[in-house]
Image (cartoon, rainbow, N blue to C red):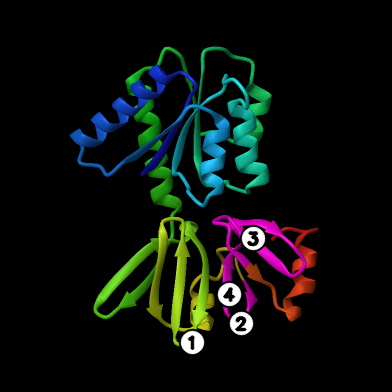
């Protein structure tokens, strides 16, 4: 699990980080925890192509508050897979939180048992919803979550797979890949590119900008279809 903790109170961040790392150590879990002290810094990092399975997010921060951060993730960046657990010392955000679809709400002071319960729930939901794409290199089989794939690029006989955690190469053809990921919102925009629509940051007439900043061309034969997407999302 890759987890972010975002709170302008450094003590709260340290407390949650310690709870998570202690739990992972006791249970032999692989957990990465990144700390952010503002909503702006968290969003900036995500826009660079990074992603999280779970975010513990304070509502009441100076500058951009947690509700605004959540709405940016959901409505602007089209990220509906990252689980969000809100943290706050006050009530009164019910209607706004509904649009963000949070996993849970933690009231201050923080209780370790609730932090861990939310971690367990996020892990269960991820396990049920995560579908893996599988490819082979020599005698080794590699698996990567479909949700983490940004796009595929065909380079002659090789396929390049670009994910939120890096890139890799394997032998294959784009037509076979397109069949394997059918039903997961992957779109062929060019003879060489197959993209994950959930990772499209900017959609233009002749090109798309992906969540990692890559600018990919849309072939002329595909442009009319993508113009329709700007009106009716898939």
What whole-number distance in Å separates the C-alpha atoms at marks 4 and 3? 13 Å
**Disc 1 designates what residue?**
156
The circle drawn on residue 193 is 4
Which residue occupies 31% across, 31% down?
20
Q: Is 55 positioned to the left or the right of 14 in the image? A: right
The reply to whether dot 1 and dot 3 touch (C-beta < 8 Å) is no
Mark 2 closeness class: few <14, some 14–19, many ≥20 residues within 10 Å: few
Q: Are marks 2 and 4 in contact (CB under 8 Å)?
A: yes
Vertical placement of 151 versus 175: above or below? above
Confirm or deny contact between disc 4 and disc 1 (CB under 8 A). Answer: no
Q: Which mark is residue 191?
A: 2
4 and 3 marks in contact (CB < 8 Å): no
The first of marks 2 and 3 along the sequence is 2
Give how far apart the Cα atoms at labels 1 and 3 are.
23 Å
Of the two numbered discs 4 and 3 in the rendering, the one whose residue sits closer to the viewer: 3
Question: Bounds of the magenta span?
Answer: 188-215
4 or 121: nearer the eye? 4
Going from the N terminus, do you reach mark 4 or mark 3 first? 4
């Amino acid at each position: 699990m890759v987890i972010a903790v975002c709170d302008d109170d450094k003590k709260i961040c340290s407390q949650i980080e310690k709870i998570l790392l202690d739990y992972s150590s006791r249970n032999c879990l692989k957990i990465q925890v990144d700390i952010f002290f503002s909503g702006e810094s968290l969003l900036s990092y995500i826009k660079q192509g990074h992603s999280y399975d779970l975010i513990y997010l304070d509502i009441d921060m100076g500058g951009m508050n947690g509700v605004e951060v959540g709405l940016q993730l959901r409505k602007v960046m089209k990220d509906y897979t990252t689980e969000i657990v809100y943290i706050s010392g006050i009530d009164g955000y019910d209607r706004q939180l509904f649009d963000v679809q949070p996993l849970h709400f933690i009231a201050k002071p923080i209780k370790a048992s609730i932090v861990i319960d939310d971690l367990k729930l996020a892990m269960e939901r991820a396990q049920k919803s995560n579908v893996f794409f599988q490819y082979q290199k020599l005698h080794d089989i590699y698996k990567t979550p479909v949700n983490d794939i940004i796009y595929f690029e065909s380079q002659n006989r090789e396929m390049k797979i670009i994910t939120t955690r890096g890139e890799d190469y394997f032998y294959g053809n784009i037509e076979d890949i397109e069949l394997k990921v059918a039903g997961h919102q992957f779109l062929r925009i060019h003879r060489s590119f197959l993209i994950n629509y959930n990772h499209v940051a900017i959609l233009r007439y002749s090109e798309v900008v992906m969540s990692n900043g890559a600018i990919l061309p849309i072939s002329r034969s595909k442009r009319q279809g993508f113009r329709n997407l700007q009106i009716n999302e898939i």
